[in-house]
Amino acid sequence: MGRERDRGQVALEYIGFIPILLFVALCGIQLGWVAYVEQQADTAARTAARVEARKGEGGEAAGKAAIRPSLASLAVIDVAETRDAVTARVSITVRSIVPGLDPVKAERTAVMPNDDPKG
């Protein structure tokens, strides 16, 4: 008789546990997305610094062209040039897919020796 009262208990336990599993899955996806955006920011910074160091112009456009178009629209690229070096700083806003998490910024900096013949 006690077994009949336990019918459906496992189904209820699964229903209660599903939100926790979904939250853990979303956190895993978010972690992977943040790592990917950080890598894209690094690529944009290196490309922008390299192009600016060689040509003296076009670093920002080259940095945005080197990354995924949907991230390029979110990227802010600042290129600073001195006589000896070119520094590119990239900041990309990482949108959150996990409820309750605020967006964060992926920031990377790259420095290249200034090879611009005009400089």
Image: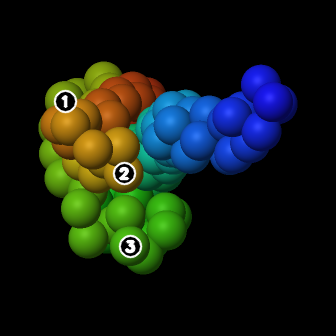
Q: Compare marks 1 and 2 and give the one earlier in the sequence.
A: 1
Separation of residues labelled 3 and 2 (CA atoms): 16 Å
Q: Tell me if residue 58 can be seen.
A: no
What is the quadrant of residue 105 in the picture?
Answer: top left
The residue to which callout 2 is attached is 97
**Which structural element holds mark 3?**
helix
Q: Which residue corresponds to the image point at 72% horizontal and 33% vertical from the top-left?
A: 6
Amino acid type at image mark 3: Ser
The residue to which callout 3 is attached is 70
**Which structural element holds mark 1?**
loop
Mark 1 vs 2: CB contact within 8 A:
no
What is the quadrant of residue 63 in the picture?
Answer: bottom left
Q: Tell me if residue 80 can be seen.
A: yes
Camera-side residue: 12 or 97?
A: 12
- How many other residues sit within 10 Å of disc 2, few (<14), some (14-19) or many (≥20)? some
From the viewer's perspective, is residue 97 above or below residue 81? below
Q: Which residue corresponds to the image point at 32% horizontal and 35% vertical from the top-left?
A: 106
- How many other residues sit within 10 Å of disc 3, few (<14), some (14-19) or many (≥20)? few
Q: Which is closer to the viewer, label 1 or label 3?
A: 3
Q: Compare marks 3 and 2 and give the one earlier in the sequence.
A: 3
